[in-house]
């Protein structure tokens, strides 16, 4: 595993002169932020050694190196989901590579269903914490010596970055919600009863990604900021049918606001 990570990191280092300390993972329907990146080098996942290949509609599957907010960044345009059949090791491999390349700050985004009855389609939610209900843990197995066997998770989402994101949203007049993201394996969306259960468990938003990447990032000491785009609402009284196309449309509409927060925050990170 470490060898594969090193090989991929070496392969990339030989092909880009950028040495970003910031990385961004773009979720379903949120790839447009990639267009705001001043791209220096980009690699199709299929060409990157040891990288799995993304299959889901709406995911481009490109690894991008460029500048955003005047800073070098690395971006994953399209992520790997557990429901696609990838192992947790594959799902989180890109984050391992980011760490090997020197990334210490990770921005993650996703599309999610709203479990909080106050939430509306098109809301942005700063992720304050998560609940991991995925059936396999990304750190299961021999511990990689980039972090402890039993990593602390008391601050999975960095409080400092959250405060900065909150401040930027306020300055810009962008309304943001805050809450807990619950990860389930999918690929079905939830039944109304499942939404009710997840709400009882404390979830504000429900999705099929992000948590494995965040756990692996925290394992290696990276700080993390996460934003969910609420693309549908699962509260029983207003439960409506949901389709992938709708999820993408809703995500599409708020992409610029999310991009604004990420870009401004990246520009303000300490050098
Ligand atoms: N549930 C799970 N994942 C999702 C949803 C949802 O309602 N919407 C977008 N991703």
Image (spheres, rainbow, N blue to C red):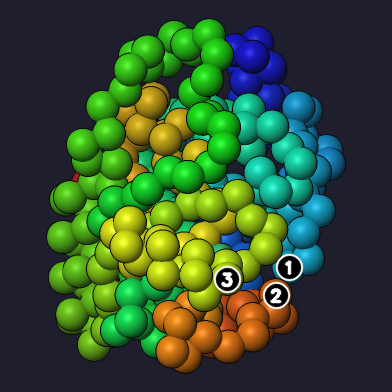
Q: Ligand 1 sits in which quadrant?
A: bottom right
Q: Which mark is residue 41?
A: none
Q: Which of 128 and 32 lies nearest the eye of the viewer?
A: 128
Q: Disc 1 designates what residue?
A: 58
Q: Where is the C terminus found, in terms of image quarters?
A: top left
* Residue 221 image point, x, y percent: 32, 28
Q: Where is the N terminus found, in terms of image quarters?
A: top right
* Residue 105 image point, x, y percent: 36, 42
Establish whether ligand 1 lies closer than 8 Å to the Cβ of label 1: no
Q: Disc 3 designates what residue?
A: 191
Q: Is residue 144 left or right of residue 59?
A: left
Which mark is first along the chain, 3 or 1?
A: 1
Q: CA distance from mark 3 to mark 2?
A: 15 Å
| Residues under numbered marks 1 and 2 in contact, where contact means CB atoms less than 8 Å apart | yes
Q: Residues within 10 Å of mark 2 (few under 14, many from 20)?
A: some
Q: Which of 152 and 264 lies nearest the eye of the viewer?
A: 152
Tag 2's secondary structure? helix
**Vertical side of 250 occupied by 20: above or below:** above
Q: Residue at horizontal 73%, vertical 37%?
A: 86
**Vertical side of 60 occupied by 259: above or below:** below
Which mark is first along the chain, 2 or 3?
A: 3
Tag 3's secondary structure? loop
Q: Disc 2 designates what residue?
A: 244
């Amino acid at each position: 595993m470490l060898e594969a990570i090193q090989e991929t990191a070496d392969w990339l280092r030989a092909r880009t002169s950028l040495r970003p300390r910031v990385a961004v993972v773009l979720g379903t329907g949120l790839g447009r932020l990639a267009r705001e990146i001043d791209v220096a080098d980009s690699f199709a996942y299929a060409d990157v050694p040891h990288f799995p290949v993304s299959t889901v509609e709406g995911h481009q599957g490109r690894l991008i190196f460029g500048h955003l907010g005047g800073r070098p960044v690395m971006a994953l345009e399209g992520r790997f989901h557990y429901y696609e059949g990838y192992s947790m090791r594959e799902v989180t491999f890109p984050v391992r590579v980011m760490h090997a390349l020197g990334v210490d700050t990770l921005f993650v985004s996703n599309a999610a269903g709203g479990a909080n009855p106050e939430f509306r389609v098109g809301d942005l939610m700063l992720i304050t914490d998560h609940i991991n209900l995925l059936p396999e843990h990304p750190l299961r197995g021999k511990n990689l010596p980039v972090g402890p066997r039993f990593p602390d998770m008391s601050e999975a989402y960095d409080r400092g970055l959250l405060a900065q994101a909150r401040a930027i949203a306020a300055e810009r007049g962008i309304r943001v919600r805050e809450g807990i993201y619950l990860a389930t394996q999918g690929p079905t969306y939830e039944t109304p009863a499942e939404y009710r259960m997840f709400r009882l468990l404390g979830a504000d938003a429900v999705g099929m990604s992000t948590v494995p990447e965040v756990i692996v990032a925290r394992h290696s000491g990276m700080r993390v900021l996460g934003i969910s785009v609420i693309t549908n609402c699962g509260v029983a009284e207003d439960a409506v049918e949901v389709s992938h196309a709708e999820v993408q449309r809703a995500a599409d509409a708020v992409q610029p606001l999310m991009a604004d927060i990420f870009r401004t925050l990246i520009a303000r990170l300490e050098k």
